[in-house]
Image (spheres, helix red, strand yellow):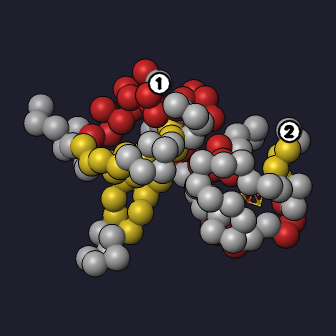
Amino acid sequence: MRDCGGCTACCWSMGVASLTPPFESCRHIDGRGCLIYDTKPEDCTKFRCLWLDDVDMPDEARPDLIGVIFYLIVDPVDGSDHLAARSSAPGGIQRTSAQTLIEIASRRMEVSIVHDDAVTMRKVGPIEV
Ligand code: SF4
Ligand code: SF4
């Protein structure tokens, strides 16, 4: 299991409901990281991107390095898991590194893609191979 290291991508991308909207820097972050680390909201504590736990993902796929955060979301209707791919930096999801990993993931399962305009969302895959 990994740790976040220098990555703070979800503090920009995810938007903790009580703090900031998605795709804006949380007001509690600066260049040193989270300023309220010991008392941060439960949402922050609970969120784990796929890269932290998936040993098959390469180290270089850390979200702040590739432009995309992968994470699992649970379908509220049937309880099934879905893969989401969310921009981890302005324009991040358009990077070749992000597009390549999304394409690979979409061969196996449907991927919900969230661009950083917070509006554009589309689903891709699985692709017939
Ligand atoms: S995106 Fe993942 S690795 Fe980066 S700070 Fe969030 S949980 Fe940690
Ligand atoms: S409170 Fe801390 S951990 Fe949570 S989003 Fe803000 S900077 Fe990140």
Respond yes or no on whether mark 1 lies under 8 Å from ligand 1.
no
Q: Earlier in the sequence, mark 1 or mark 2?
A: 2
Ligand 2's quadrant = bottom right
In the picture of the structure, the residue carrying the numbered disc 2 is: 31
Mark 2 Cβ inside 8 Å of ligand 2: no
Indicate the amino acid at tag 1.
Arg
Instruction: Count residues near mark 2 (Cα–Cα under 10 Å), then give few for <14, some for 14-19, many for 20+.
Output: few
Looking at the picture, tell me which residue is in the foreground, 35 or 18: 18
Location of the C terminus by quadrant is: top left
Residue 80: percent from left, percent from top: 30, 69
Residue 54 at x, y = what percent? 49, 46
The residues tagged by marks 1 and 2 sit, at their Cα atoms, a distance apart of 23 Å
Q: Residue at x 46, y 34 (%)?
A: 93
Judged from the image, the secondary structure of the residue bearing numbered disc 2 is: loop
Q: Which residue occupies 89% across, 55% down? A: 35
User: What amino acid type should be assigned to the residue bearing mark 2?
Assistant: Gly
Q: Nearer the viewer, residue 77 or 50?
A: 77
Report which residue position mark 1 lands on.
95
The picture quadrant where one finds residue 128 is top left
Q: Residue at x 74, y 54 (%)?
A: 26
Neighbor class of circle 1 (other Cα within 10 Å; few <14, some 14-19, many 20+) is few
User: Which residue extends farthest bottom?
Assistant: 77
